[in-house]
Structures are given as structure tokens and as C-alpha cells.
Amino acid sequence: MNTRPLVLVVMDGVGVGPGDRYDAVATADTPTFDRLRGAGVYQEIFASGTHVGLSSDSDMGNSEVGHNTMGAGRIIAQGAKRVDDAVLGGEIWEGAWRDVVTRATTGDGTLHLIGLLSDGNVHSSWEHLLLLLDHVKADGVQRVRLHTLFDGRDVEDRTADQYAERLEDALATRTEGTGLDWAIASGGGRMVTTMDRYEANWSVVEAGWRAHVQGTARPFTSVGEAIRVLREETPGISDQLLEAFTIVDQEGAPVGRVHDGDAVVIFNFRGDRAIELTRAFVEGSGFTGFDRGTVPDVFFAGMTLYDGDTNMPPVRLVQPPTITDTVSELIARAGLRQLAASETQKFGHMTYFWNGNRSDPFNAQTETYIDIPSDQIEFDKAPQMKAAETADYIVRALQEGGYDFLRSNLAGGDMVGHTGNFDSTVLAVEAVDAAVGAIAAAVEAAGGCLVVTADHGNAEDMVERDKQGQPRASEGGQPLWKTAHSTNPVPLYIVDYSDQEWAAVDGVDAAGLSNLAATLLTLLDLPVPENYRPSLVAVARNSG
Ligand code: 3PG
Ligand code: CO
């Protein structure tokens, strides 16, 4: 006997928080979580920092590293850390970087640097950007244009002006008195400019293309003016949503559109939100994302590999880690049938990241991937997102039978948490709770086992805090709402409705997301590889 069907639900961004009035998970009415907690194993596990292969324990978790770690069953130095090591250790400057410099210093080539202006270390790093600028200078690149995406999602919101000023200072200190021609040429908030993911909304990338490449987005004469005017027009607007813009000169001409012969580098290291713009630059006439007009003939490089299946981009500054023998690969090899179903915003998380950066099933005969289309609106406007639809899908699949391992991601805690809207986040968590409740009932009816966890924290701590952990307030005395993830642990519930006998293993050292894969294999009655971190449960074989 075993615990099949085994169902895993990842509640994106639902960590274990302080339980105060800024904790949207504790504030939400969550009868399912309360019930599950008493019905099986409940444990809090690590989901940030070195526990998920990041450089330091002050690094908050994120979905890429969380799903990579859950799927890999090991702690693997992540893309972020790989790139960090290559940049700080200097290895990056020996590879494709030389070709970038050659192109940018030949003829009237310009070097374009496009990326997220942030020190959130989720998609990009401030330190990498500064080191890039140092090397650009040392390598004698005369003309540089920066295309800056504002964050407000992995860093404190409404700080875009500060990051823009810091960048302008960094450019000024490096160019003063040198005759170098470096400038910011375009920008916009990341959720409306360039950084769409999983093809949820190509018009976001199109807006970026107009701003960065064609120079035809809304014109401003400086980045400071752009931020000021856009904020005046929509008071309280989040940095993520600032409209795409192009910087123009006195005559109204763009200061840095992309031309034939230029070099273009995306300095984001995380792939999900970098791949679409990459494809717009690299793909030929088969590209269907949007009408690109004339595509400039450029030398394009990404910070690292953004998509292992399509080998994109073909040129990258740092080679990525390869993750093999992930849990779903092992389950596929064992011949069991698997279903992955998530809404678009997290679809690649449950497939691509989960599978060690690989999009396709290991065995198309035994694996089914379902993408439930996400809404194309700001997520606090419909905070339930597709929780109910996703649950319905899993429930139906359980009723019909046929799958041994089903996995799903419920996006609301994270996506709505990122808006900084507390009340909406509470509603999102309640929708997640209801969806887990529906799935739990179906797992019970099927006599299977339910595992519920999260990839990182977000919704459980919705306020910016000072170093002592005290909530910070805005100038008007309102709470300073936080949009970013956290370093909090996440819950792990295991509730078994089969007649399998098993028990939680006590004393597993620093239990975290990396222990999940072995736990799932154990519940599925499959062998656990030696290099996996240990299972959190041990099954006693049941004769029945
Ligand atoms: C995003 O890309 O939305 C955030 O930067 C990180 O969120 P995720 O890691 O939960 O996807
Ligand atoms: Co998130």
C-alpha cells in the first residue's frame, strides 16, 4: 500500500508570520488551515537564504529558488548565487562579455543595458550593475544607454526616484571629465513594462519594446521628470505600475533607441521575466508575441541562461547550474503518472522551475501540464485569482482518477501580497484556504495523501519594519505597506487519508524546502537518492 494519489499544493507566498495585525494569513479566516493542522503533521520549515541556495541568510526566498529547491530535493547553488560568484569572482569578464565589448566599441556601436533597477536580488542585483559599469568603463565603451525598470515589488515601494538618483550618481562618478557618453534612455514600472512572464500579457513587453528599442513611448526629458509627473497623475501609484517612457532630447528625439550594430545586455539573472524580451530580440520571423516593426540587428547577451529547453539566450555572460534527477524526473522514471496544474502566473514555477529549469515533461505519456489562464488585471482587484478554478481542476482529476502524483500552485498569497494591499491579501488567503479545503475533501474521498506548503513568505508580513522589527509608518502616519517577500519560514501540512502507517521523523537538521522531495518520494513508496536531503516522514510498511 502507499499513499497514492499524493497531492501537493504550494500556496505561493503564504509563510508563517508574527501573528500581528500586519499578518494577512493570521488575520484571514482560514478554517481549512486550522483543521488540517490538527489532522496530521504540521511543521514550519525554512524557505529563504542559504536553505534555498542563496548567498546569505538575509536573502528572502522567492519562487524560482523555492521551486528549484523543492523539486531538486537538495540545496543547489542557485542561478542568483552562480551569477553572483561569477561577477564577484571576475570569471564573468572572460567569456561572452569580451564579444559584447567588441561590438560596443566597433564603429558607432552603443551598449544598451536593460534590467530591473533594484537591490532586491530576486531578478537583478545592484552590485552587479555597478560592477558592470566599472568594467564598461575599464573596457573603454564610449556610448552606453541604460533602460531602467522600476521595482517596488522586491524592494520597498515608492523608492523608484531614489534608485534612479543612485544610478544617475553612479553614471556621473564614472563619466565626469572623461568625455564618455552614458545616459539613461528609457524605463517604466516592471509590471507594465517589459517584465511579463509565462506569456501572460505580451502587451507589457510591447510597451517595453517601444520604450527601449523604438524610442516611441511617452516622452520625458529625464527619468526624474518621468517619475514625478507619473506620480502626480496617479497619486499613490506603485513603482511597479509606472507607465513606460522614453527619454528625449531638447528636439524631442529619443536619446537612446536601439540601432543596428549595437550591443544589448539584459542584466537580470532570473529568467521568467527576462525571456520574453530576450525572444523579441533574438527570434526570427516566427516570433508572434507582438508586432516588433523592424528588428535591429544587435549583438544580444543575457546575464545567464533564461530557458534551458530553448537554449535562450544563445549568448549569456554566465553559464547556469544544471539540475538533474529532480523529483518529478524520478517519479516519471518509476512510471507513475503526474499532473501539474497552475494558473499562468505560476505555471512555469510548477513545471520549469520545479523540474530544474526544464519546461517539457520528462515523459509526455505519463505527465500532463495544465495552464489555467490568469486574469490580466491588477491582482488586488480580483484577489481570489484562479484559486477556485485550480482547485476544481485538481478535484475533477482526483474524481476521474489516473494520476499518482498531482501538484499545483495557488498564486494569490504572493501575487496579491505583492500589491501591498492588506485587505485584498486577506481575501486572497481566504480563497487559498477555501481551495485547499476543496482539494482536501477530494483527496479524502480518493483515500490519498495531501501535502500543503509554500515556496516562500509574503502575505504573512505586509508591513515594512525597522531593524528592531517594529512596523514603519508613512509620513501620513499610515502603515508603510510592504510588497516584497520575507525570510519567514513556511508551513508544511501532511494529512494522510490512506491506510498507510507512517510517522514524522524527529530531529531533521534545519528542515526546509529541500526536504520536501524526499518526503514526497517516501510517501509514494519510491526510493530516495542518497544525495537528497532526508525525508521528514518515515513509512512503516502496512500489510493491508
Ligand atoms: C515577481 O517576479 O513577481 C517577484 O519579483 C518575485 O515573485 P515570485 O518569486 O513569487 O515569483
Ligand atoms: Co512573489
Image (tube, rainbow, N blue to C red):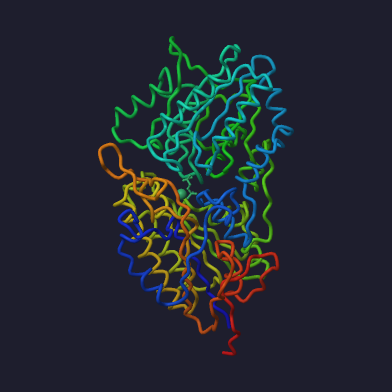
Can you give x and y, in whole percent of width and height, for residue 39 in the image? Answer: 42, 77
Q: Answer left or right for 514 relative to 216.
A: right
Q: Is residue 106 above or below residue 199?
A: above
Residue that sits furthest to the left in the current view: 476
Residue at (29, 28) in percent of width and height: 233
Q: Is residue 116 above or below residue 212?
A: below
Q: Is residue 91 above or below residue 45?
A: above
In the depicted view, which residue is nearer to us: 80 or 294? Answer: 80
In the depicted view, which residue is nearer to us: 310 or 194? Answer: 194
Residue that sits furthest to the front in the current view: 468
Q: Answer left or right for 472 relative to 539.
A: left
Can you give x and y, in whole percent of width and height, for residue 13 in the image? Answer: 44, 55
Can you give x and y, in whole percent of width and height, for residue 278 in the image? Answer: 58, 36
- Looking at the rendered image, the quarter that the C terminus falls into is bottom right
- Looking at the rendered image, the quarter that the N terminus falls into is bottom right
Q: How many marks?
A: 0
Residue that sits furthest to the bottom in the current view: 543
In the depicted view, which residue is nearer to us: 347 or 177? Answer: 177
Q: Is residue 284 above or below residue 7?
A: above
Can you give x and y, in whole percent of width and height, for residue 198 in the image? Answer: 51, 46
